[in-house]
Image: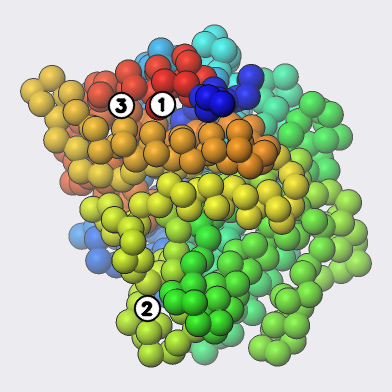
Amino acid sequence: MTEKLTFPDGFLWGGATAANQCEGAYDADGRGLANVDVVPIGADRLAIITGKKKMFDFEEGYFYPAKEAIDMYHRFKEDIALFGEMGFKTYRMSIAWSRIFPKGDELEPNEAGLKFYEDLFKECHKYGIEPLVTITHFDCPMHLIEQYGGWRSRKMLEFYERLCRTLFTRYKGLVKYWLTFNEINMILHAPFMGAGLCFEEGENEEQVKYQAAHHELVASAIATKLAHEIDPENKVGCMLAAGQNYPNTCHPRDVWAGIEEDRKNYFFIDVQARGEYPNYAKTAWEREGINVEMTEEDLQLLKEHTVDFISFSYYSSRVASGDPKVNELTEGNIFASLKNPYLEASEWGWQIDPLGLRITLNTIWDRYQKPMFIVENGLGAVDTPDENGYVADDYRIDYLAAHVKAMREAINEDGVVLWGYTTWGCIDLVSAGTGEMKKRYGFIYVDRDNEGKGTLKRSKKKSFDWYKEVVATNGASVK
Ligand code: P53
């Protein structure tokens, strides 16, 4: 029997970006300041995004790449035309909260911000591109952080609800796919970037993080409820930074460590997809003296308003060990992982594992039986353009082709349900982890460097035509 090379009809091929990493125009048309604006490139970035060092405004001596980013705010028509040329069926992007509510706690939205996204969505539809909107991709208005402490405060439920109601009402008919929080598990790893959290000396950080996580989970349930009420056509998804943990050896204690590490991440999706806090979390909180305040009404919202689909980012698998001596060696990364001797790694040390994507798809499917959407995948690499801005990025094509095959196998051979695939940073943009421009993911090259120099000119890489063919043949061109 010959292998089936195409994807299911209507499969949503596309690309993904996030507002703060591409829009720039950080103070245009009434936009307010956000946490994602004040994270500089350089040595202090990790301490700032993890909430260990406070930076609440721009400071002398730092460069803030999000201020201008790739200026998509002013160039979205050109950029969406290029997405259209590649045949995108969907474009995943995010809303900058502080364009809509500059401080976050106003009662009335900023019309200029609403108009910007309305124009952008209409531009997508011109090319038959269905927008897939992340309501919050790491961003939180600075005023909400200074005034209320970000997601540690229950007040956030009210502000987030107002944001969602405004978006669902205004964009009814223009948008039907929504994600509530980008990489919701990032709150554990980069709490300032993920949820506007900073810690005080001597504070129980785990307690603060899980209380904030509870607020986000309830906010996500409220958003799901509202989305369905306002337009029954709406589909709402959760979003996980995924990647299976493999045991470092077949020693049972390493297998157990892998399960425990995975649970730290699936914890969020267990609540969003199944509607209840899992027992392993409740017992762990009790053991560790973590007391998360929640009401009966919260629990009912979580129960009744689970997500329609599960989306995730996948770059790499991870390796976990139950041996304390082995673990000592790996502290300090956002996502600590041991080296996998069977895998090669990117220039930034991210281990490349296409079969890991098939494993992850199957694990998530087995756990939840809800449709899935891969909303980020790709290779961050150094690109060297020729004088015309052309990059022969065969390494990126190889990475993506291998992952496309892995998901095709998961669909056609294993029977998982997958709605679509959006590659990360379909146009070069600022790296979230490092703040660099040099770490590029795009099919479209953008002339800008780590110091903010460059013309911002867009040009097509080799992968541009490659992806166009993949979309046009519904995957069959990948052999
Ligand atoms: P960058 C770490 C691990 C996994 C996903 O990341 C991550 C991160 C943060 O660095 O974030 C997602 O830009 C995120 C995007 C981000 C992308 O992965 O560090 O949703 O905003 O840009 C890639 O190479």
Circle 2 or circle 1, nearest the eye: 1
Determine whether the residue tagged by mark 3 lies in a helix, strand or loop: helix
**Residue displayed at 25% across by 66% down:** 43
Q: Nearer the viewer, residue 122 or 26?
A: 122
Determine whether the residue tagged by mark 2 lies in a helix, strand or loop: loop
CB of residue at label 3: within 8 Å of ligand 1?
A: no
**Residue displayed at 86% across by 34% down:** 229
N-terminal label among 2 and 1: 2
How many other residues sit within 10 Å of disc 1, few (<14), some (14-19) or many (≥20)? some
Q: Nearer the viewer, residue 336 or 434?
A: 336
For the residues bearing labels 2 and 1, Cβ distance under 8 angstroms: no
Q: Position of residue 151 (x, y in %)?
A: 63, 63
Residue 11 seen in the current view: yes
C-alpha gap between disc 2 and disc 1: 38 Å
Residue sitting at the far top: 126
Q: Looking at the picture, does residue 344 appear above or below residue 172?
A: below
Q: Nearer the viewer, residue 368 or 97?
A: 368
N-terminal label among 3 and 2: 2
Q: Is residue 1 left or right of residue 42?
A: right
Quarter of the image for residue 438 reads top left
**Residue displayed at 39% across by 23% down:** 467
Q: Which mark is residue 463?
A: 3
**Residue at mark 2:** 331
Q: Position of residue 405 (x, y in %)?
A: 46, 36
Residue 53 seen in the current view: no
Q: Position of residue 118 (x, y in %)?
A: 59, 21
Quarter of the image for residue 218 reads bottom right
Circle 3 or circle 2, nearest the eye: 3
- Amino acid type of the residue tagged 1 in the rendering: Val
Determine whether the residue tagged by mark 1 lies in a helix, strand or loop: loop
**Residue at mark 1:** 478
How many other residues sit within 10 Å of disc 3, few (<14), some (14-19) or many (≥20)? many
